[in-house]
Image (tube, rainbow, N blue to C red):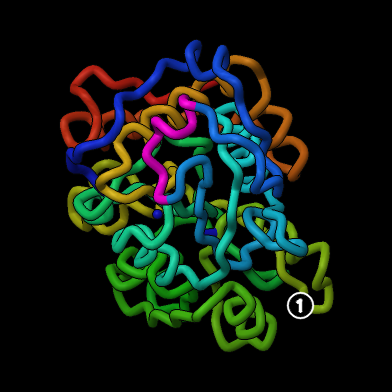
Amino acid sequence: MSKTLLARSRVAPLLTVAALLISTLTGCGDDSEAPVSDAAAALGTIEPGVLKVAIQPYAPYTSLVGDKLAGLDADILNAVAGKLGLTVKPELTDFAGMLASVQSRRVDITIGGVAWTADRQKQGLFTDPPYYSPPAMAVRSGEHYQTVNDLQGKDLGTVEGYVWVKSIQAVPGAKLHAYPDGNGVFDDLGAGRINVGFLDPLLVLAAQKERPELKVETQYLTPPTDAEVKARPQYEYFRPYMTSFYLPKQATALEKAISEQLRAMYASGELTKLIEKYGGAPEQFLKPAPEIAATRRGVDRPADWQPPSI
């Protein structure tokens, strides 16, 4: 389900991935007595050697099992943190709290279906995309929606703060229903109070299995054309979007190190295995749509930036 921060600050110099791997790394566990390597300390986290991460309960992307992160985004971050010698320390909040915690630098990072947007990147830093998210819709069985025109005049739901809020508001005659979390979307969808719920695709797939009584199914919206997006720019988020991990403006060294590790995971096949573990199709999740590159070029990435891909 469910879409950034750019500034310079005085931080320790970034070590290359090779240097990070050569250095003595601490594990991504709970051993608070483990020494912090020079490489990990150089990343400039709030607490040296510790990666404070804000999440919301958003399985199968993020959840807290005891004091451990679980889910797709969690698995990716845990793998990256282990390679960088950082111990992950999670904090539970809601989606608005995730963004606010990063923007006020109460945490080092937030993860879990966070879409890159031009507005968010003004207030923080985005990593390269760990994966891309196709435009999934949760609908009641027997109902069919294919294009944005099919959504006109309908009751459409999503979570407060998600990029689809603005997209839904741009649909002629549609009524927005915004909820604190995905459970509200599914409850009202099952009860017939809304026609369509816009959430991240793995969340919809999980709900189909875990709550069969709702009689919900997954459908994929045909992305709007360039002409439709030009006429209604907010339709952009009815297209496949890039998720990213979101960090404070000051975290330039940490963002660069994480992005390096993410690109290495594309190349090694590690991300492919994780996407498949959670029921996603690598071809959909790990190959960017044609318009993705232009979105960030000259904004928070160089003019020749290429998004990662398998």
Residue 310 in the image, given as x and y percentages of width and height: 56, 20
- In this rendering, the answer to whether 121 lies above or below 65 is above
- The residue indicated by pointer 1 is 214
Q: Quadrant of the N terminus?
A: bottom right
Which residue is located at x 37 percent, y 53 percent?
237
Residue 255 in the image, given as x and y percentages of width and height: 38, 35
Residue 149 visible, this orientation = no
Instruction: State the image quarter where residue 119 is shown.
Output: bottom left
Residue 91 located left or right of residue 270: left
Instruction: State the image quarter where residue 100 is shown.
Output: bottom left
In-front residue for pair 164/174: 164
Which residue is located at x 63 percent, y 32 percent?
26
In-front residue for pair 287/169: 287
- Tell me which segment is drawn in magenta: 38-46
In-front residue for pair 115/102: 102
- In this rendering, the answer to whether 170 lies above or below 107 is below
